[in-house]
Image: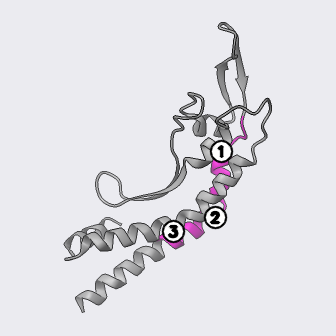
Amino acid sequence: MDSLVRALRAEADGKELRKELAKNMRDALRPGAEQAKSAIMGMSSAGPGTSPALRSAIAKKIRPEVKLGGNWSGARVKAFKTRTARGFVNAPKRTNRPRGWRHLVYGRADSWTQQYGTAHWFDHALIYDTARYKRAVHEAMESTARRIANRVN
């Protein structure tokens, strides 16, 4: 991956090639992001419908992320923090873990409760198709490498 990034930087129109590579890699990971979104939307919900809805707020923050260069180069599906979900910034992380999370009961200053989401909803949505996503990302990288090689020849 790093050698491809260096080759892109050396290319005359490396900026355009980098943009195309990043787009192709994000497109390769989009099905995984959609699976994770459907997994969180499938989590059961109890209680009155409050706004904003927790599951949809988490689903909106799940996106494929691609970074080329810097400290980290690669592609991944990431659930970003949810700042708008009723002050529950770490909602994707907390709903994914089996231990759940603790929070104050609304309207009671001294009463805490333990709440559980669907354990590993994010992990299980992606783990079974990991090989397919890796192949798709590698194909996007190979396509860009072929384009660079064709320009050199």
Name the amino acid, label 1.
Ser
- Residue bearing mark 2: 129
Q: Secondary structure at mark 1?
A: helix
Residue 128 belongs to magenta span = yes
Q: Nearer the viewer, residue 80 or 118?
A: 80
Q: How is the image coloured?
A: one colour
Mark before the other along the chain sequence, 1 or 2:
1
The residue wearing badge 3 is 27
The magenta stretch spans which residues? Answer: 117-137
Give the residue at x 29% y 69%: 3
Earlier in the chain: of badge 1 and badge 3, it is: 3
Q: Residue sitting at 46 percent across and 68 percent down?
A: 25
Amino acid type of the residue tagged 2 in the rendering? Asp
Q: Quadrant of residue 51?
A: top right
Q: Is residue 2 left or right of residue 114?
A: left
- Against 99, residue 80 (above or below) is below
Q: Position of residue 148 (x, y in %)?
A: 29, 82
The reply to whether discs 1 and 2 touch (Cβ–Cβ < 8 Å) is: no
Q: Does the magenta-highlighted stretch encompass residue 123?
A: yes
Frontmost residue, 107 versus 10: 107
Which residue is denoted by mark 1 in the rendering? Answer: 56
The one nearer the camera, 111 or 54, is 54
Q: Secondary structure at mark 2?
A: loop
Q: Provide the major secondary structure of the magenta segment.
A: helix
Q: Residue at x 67, y 42 (%)?
A: 55
**Residue 106: percent from the left, percent from the top?**
69, 17
Q: Residues within 10 Å of mark 3 (few under 14, many from 20)?
A: some
